[in-house]
Amino acid sequence: MAGLRMWYLAVTVLAVSTISLRGFVPAVHAAKSNFCGTFVEPFQFLCTERRMHSADGFELLLHRIGGGTATDSNAAPVLIMHSEFLNGDSWFQFTDAADKLLPLLLVDAGFDVWIGHERATKWSHGHLSLETTDTRFWDWTWDEHAQYDVPAYLEYIKNVTGSPVHYIGMSQSATAGAATAANLRSSSGIRSMTLIGPNIYAGDSNSVVLAAWAFIFGNIIDEANYENGYQSGAFNFTTAFPGVTSINGQSPLALALEVISGPNCCLGTATASFTNGWDGTNSFKNLLHYQQGMRSNTWRRFDYISADGNTQAYGGPSAPTYHPEDISTNIPILVVYGGNDAMAPQAGVQLLLSRLRNAESVLLPNYAHFDLLWSSRRTQDIFIPILQFLERHK
Ligand SMILES: *[C@@H]1O[C@H](CO)[C@@H](O)[C@H](O)[C@H]1NC(C)=O
Ligand SMILES: *[C@@H]1O[C@H](CO)[C@@H](O)[C@H](O)[C@H]1NC(C)=O
């Protein structure tokens, strides 16, 4: 833990403009964000921004890096999706002086790289009709990423490039990407999938994971809320720990991310910037959805607990289950996971691997969850194997 140092990025706060429309004040944002200027253009790479909305109204930003020029119009598109609590910035933080950034490494290797941002995060947080103070703005879990957001990104990129997309997802985005592929049951929009630390099954290490989560979320997600429905609205790390700005010089979020991810072997110097009110936010419902999966060691849509609630949502008394076997065998999958990961425990990932029909894997025995993103050895341990996998399936 002592090795964890904060690396604050100088991020100019996104200029937010709100406009009145038919009596409500939707969260509509400035025409262009400063993501490209802050993270990509300093490296002399091209960067363009696309803004779209999910079918349920959430703003989704997409950044295309280095692609779309005449010389690389045949480059295979790659969509890179970040971990929960974070945003697309997390792919642009150096962990070590000799370090590489995954998006730029892939552009240099001839890929057409797109960075996505999950709904209700730093860069994608508008909505066509809902304000963030409305609990309906927070009425989603990772399953809505799979139902709406990931399909919208994949379809958009395929429309623009004419090619199916190589999908790379870390943690929650690995779960959402795999669920998207299971829902599609076809490979028409997806060329390959790379799942980094997929937190889909708990395996037999439930107690370790639950203990870690209980430490962080125990006072918020308690048994009563779990059994009697769910607390709605926004989970906000800053307000969940009022008055706590630093613990031993670290932000509570940095500390929490490390605790819930298990013992770290090789966490480098970068962690999230945590300078924006959107870092560390999530929905209560999503956290509960994770709890449900861990407790039951199942991969299911959100369980409304009551037969009535599930029937209203899904047309049947129980929450539908996702099956890894539903993912098309025409989609090659690379799973990268850590032996010390408490969020995506080894036994759970191995259960997933036993059920995927076209997967290969890289096990990094000493890695904990956030080492998979910020290890000082990530270039040789993770990025190069991903690049080799993509080149084999170009
Ligand atoms: C993709 O193209 C189709 C056909 O033109 C269009 O209907 C659809 O809205 C497009 N999807 C996205 C996400 O832009
Ligand atoms: C989270 O809480 C902090 C502190 O109250 C606040 O500044 C920030 O805007 C909140 N974030 C969101 C997305 O509401």
Image: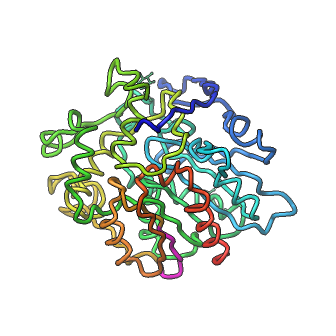
In screen coordinates, is 257 left or right of 5?
Answer: left
The segment highlighted magenta reads: 329-335
The percent position of residue 28, horizontal first and vertical second, equals 57, 31
Q: Seen from this angle, which residue lies furthest top?
A: 243
The percent position of residue 381, horizontal first and vertical second, equals 55, 62
In screen coordinates, is 350 left or right of 126?
Answer: left
The percent position of residue 10, horizontal first and vertical second, equals 64, 27
Q: How many marks?
A: 0
Q: Is residue 48 above or below residue 365?
A: above
Q: Residue at x 38, y 78 (%)?
A: 325
Q: Which residue is drawn at 40% across and 53% down?
A: 368
Q: Which residue is drawn at 44% across and 68% down?
A: 363
Q: In this view, does 255 lie above or below 348?
A: above
The percent position of residue 290, horizontal first and vertical second, equals 30, 51
Judge by depth and name the residue closer to the eye, 81 or 98.
98
Please say which color scheme the image uses. Answer: rainbow
For residue 381: magenta? Answer: no
In the picture, the quarter occupied by the N terminus is: top left
Q: In which quarter of the image is ligand 2?
A: top left
In the picture, the quarter occupied by the C terminus is: bottom right
